[in-house]
Each structure stands twice: as C-alpha cells, then as structure tokens.
Image (cartoon, rainbow, N blue to C red):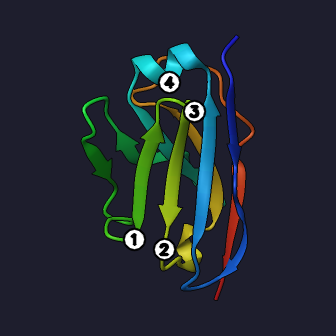
Amino acid sequence: QVQLVESGGGLVQAGGTLRLSCVASGTIFKSNAMGWYRQGPGKQREVIAAIYSHGRTMYDDSVKGRFTISRDYVKNTAYLDMNDLKPEDTGVYYCNTVPLVIRQWGRGTPVTVSS
C-alpha cells in the first residue's frame, strides 16, 4: 500500500521559516523523482519543487531562492525547507512523485503565512 504522510506545516508570520517533511513508501520513494505540490486557496494543485534521483532539483519561479528540496533515502523522507515565507505561500502542501505515477495523495500539511 502506498503511503505519503506530510507534516511540518503551521501558522507563521511573513519572513518566517518552516520545514516540511514527507515520509513515503520505500518503493515509491526510491524509484521516482519526488516533488512538493502546493494548493493555494481557490487554486489548482501545482508542483513547486522536485528532486531527481541524481540530485538535480527544479523549482517554480515563485519559490526559487527561498525554498530548498532534499531527500533522505535511508529514511524514505523528502523535505522542503521554506525561508522568507510570503502570504502567497499559504496553502496545503503535498508530496508525490514527479511526474505523477500514482493516483493516491496524502492528507497534506497546511501552511498559513500571515502578513
């Protein structure tokens, strides 16, 4: 059974930092590039950061220079370090493969950035 469990979200003031974590099933994690997706209020879910098996990373322009994605193969965990948070970063954050190869999603972890 596929497992995706996100954590680390919360309420933070603009300019603050958060670290999100995602524990994924071993097979899914080791065999695919992993990414963080964000769904803002009234918006579609979109990928904002991805990390590939050889370590290459990709970031959406909206988070480039502020967010850092990483992964730990021993812990089957992906991380998203978020710095200089802005109100427009508010949303629910999910992890999943990139591109999507499974239909299942975790519950996500909510992030609220106050101005």
- Left or right of 115: which side holds 79? left
Q: Which mark is residue 29?
A: 4
Q: Amino acid at mark 2?
A: Asn
Mark 4 and mark 3 residues within 8 Å of each other at the beta carbon: no
Which callout, 1 or 3, points at the residue further toward the start of the chain? 1
SS at mark 4?
helix
Residue holding disc 3: 75
Which callout, 4 or 3, points at the residue further toward the start of the chain? 4
Which quadrant: the C terminus? Answer: bottom right
Which callout, 2 or 1, points at the residue further toward the start of the chain? 1
Residue at 58%, 81% in the rendered image: 16
Q: Amino acid at mark 3?
A: Lys
* Residue sitting nearer the eye, 93 or 45: 93
Residue that extends furthest to the front in the rendered view of this protein: 74
> Is residue 51 shown to the viewer in this render?
yes
Residue holding disc 1: 66
Residue at 65%, 22% in the rendered image: 104
